Image (cartoon, rainbow, N blue to C red):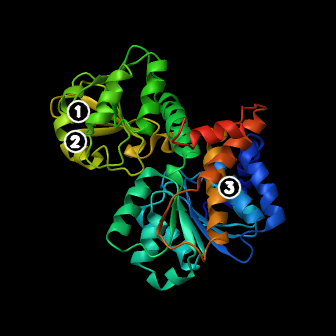
Amino acid sequence: MSEIRDESLWESGKRKIEWVRQNMSLLRSVEEDFKRDQPFKGLKVALSIHLEAKTAYLCKVLAAGGAEMYITGSNPLSTQDDVAAGLVHDGLNVFAWHGATDEEYHRHISEVVKVGPNIIIDDGGDLVNLIHNEYPELIPNVIGGCEETTTGIIRLIAMNKDGQLKFPMMLVNNAKCKYLFDNRYGTGQSVWDGINRTTNLIVAGKNVVVAGYGWCGKGVAMRAKGLGASVIVCEVDPIKAMEAVMDGFKVMKMVDAAKVGDFFVTVTGCKDVITEKAFMNMKDGAILCNAGHFDCEVDVAGLKKLSVESKLARNNIDGYKLPNGNWLYVIGEGRLVNLAAGDGHPAEIMDMSFAIQALSAAYLVKNKDKLTDKIVYVPDEIDKEVANRKLKFWELEIDKLTPEQEKYLNSWQV
């Protein structure tokens, strides 16, 4: 049972999946382990992650481990219909299509929850929130789940603080082999891939405003600098603002940065980061986009109300004319730009993130009778296993501590 746009697109989808498979050596090794060990035999896995080729391969790896897969997207504009068709052609259950309405998106995520999953793999917390709010009777079936992104972890921590989180959730985003690479290098490259392919404009010599200087913001700023831009960082955290200064970037309030910015990228996980006050300060032709999970960082609804005219300026770019005559342009409706306007993170980066996902899901099953906390951090041994496998595939060797060195480092006496 599936609900996708067009199953006849399967050949294109399978080519994409095979391409990333060739470039995801970690997941290939995990797939071989899973085929042998069958950690998910007899279990249902509900997955909501941006549905493109790398996610599809993760789904196939979990299925190779015995999982009965129920798959949906985590953003209406990030699903690739040919990839969804490729998964369905291989016998997996998919409920997603590109350009879903709010009603369709809710129906699709509901379909994967209604099966009564044993494991949940989430990106932004939609599945976890849905099962708690609309299908609480299915919660006893859930062994636990894994959360992929910062925004989802914020929601999980808030739920747990209020005593509302009813099963263990592993904070995959907080694993070192995830945030140090995926959030920084993956977001940094894929955001500019999306912007550049959509706008076909040069970045060198422009002023780029990056809102948020967490690991994702650091990556976006670093890559903008590498492309020749002058970078301005907007922050609410004084420590992160100091980091930005010492990394060589200007720091301003958004209302002031709005006066000089050519490109604006929000990466905060918050809402109302760029609103009317900033819009009215922006120069004609400013380009806005969002790299946070939800489409509430750039107040697109407010911009629509403020504008006196709108147009489709270019494929995936909407233009809005302000009362002062200036035009502002929004990429991908203010949704996650690297997926709404691109193919997401590079395969080699997602190889690490999805290896963490797969191994964390197996960890939940193996330790289901031992986990008492609802918020579970990825064990250090999983992080190190992924790192060691990656180094091996890179054909790199590193030094090891001698017994004397280990004793020295673990002793308070010199």
Q: Nearer the viewer, mark 2 or mark 3?
A: 3
Q: Say whether residue 1 is visible.
A: no
180 sits left or right of 293 in the view: right
Q: Residue at x 20, y 34 (%)?
A: 278
Q: Nearer the viewer, residue 384 or 227?
A: 384
Alpha-carbon distance for marks 2 and 1? 9 Å
Q: Residue at x 66, y 58 (%)?
A: 358
Q: Position of residue 353 (x, y in %)?
A: 60, 48
Determine whether label 2 and label 3 are within 8 Å by CB.
no
Whichever of labels 2 and 3 marks the residue nearer the N terminus, that label is 3
413 sits left or right of 163 in the view: right
Label 1 sits on what residue type? Answer: Met
Whichever of labels 2 and 1 marks the residue nearer the N terminus, that label is 1
Q: Which mark is residue 2?
A: none
Whichever of labels 1 and 3 marks the residue nearer the N terminus, that label is 3
- Residue with the most extreme bottom position: 137
397 sits left or right of 373 in the view: right
Quarter that holds the C terminus? top right
- Residue with the most extreme front position: 413
Which residue in the structure is indicated by mark 3? Answer: 58
Quarter that holds the N terminus? bottom right
In the rendered view, tell whether residue 311 sits above or below residue 138.
above
Q: Nearer the viewer, mark 2 or mark 1?
A: 1
Q: Nearer the viewer, residue 326 or 387?
A: 387
Label 2 sits on what residue type? Answer: Thr
Q: Position of residue 250 (x, y in %)?
A: 29, 21
Q: Say whether residue 327 is visible.
A: yes
Q: Position of residue 151 (x, y in %)?
A: 41, 53
Q: Nearer the viewer, residue 17 or 117?
A: 117
Label 2: how many Cα within 10 Å (few below 14, some 14–19, many 20+): some
Which residue in the structure is indicated by mark 1? Answer: 254
Q: Which mark is residue 275?
A: 2
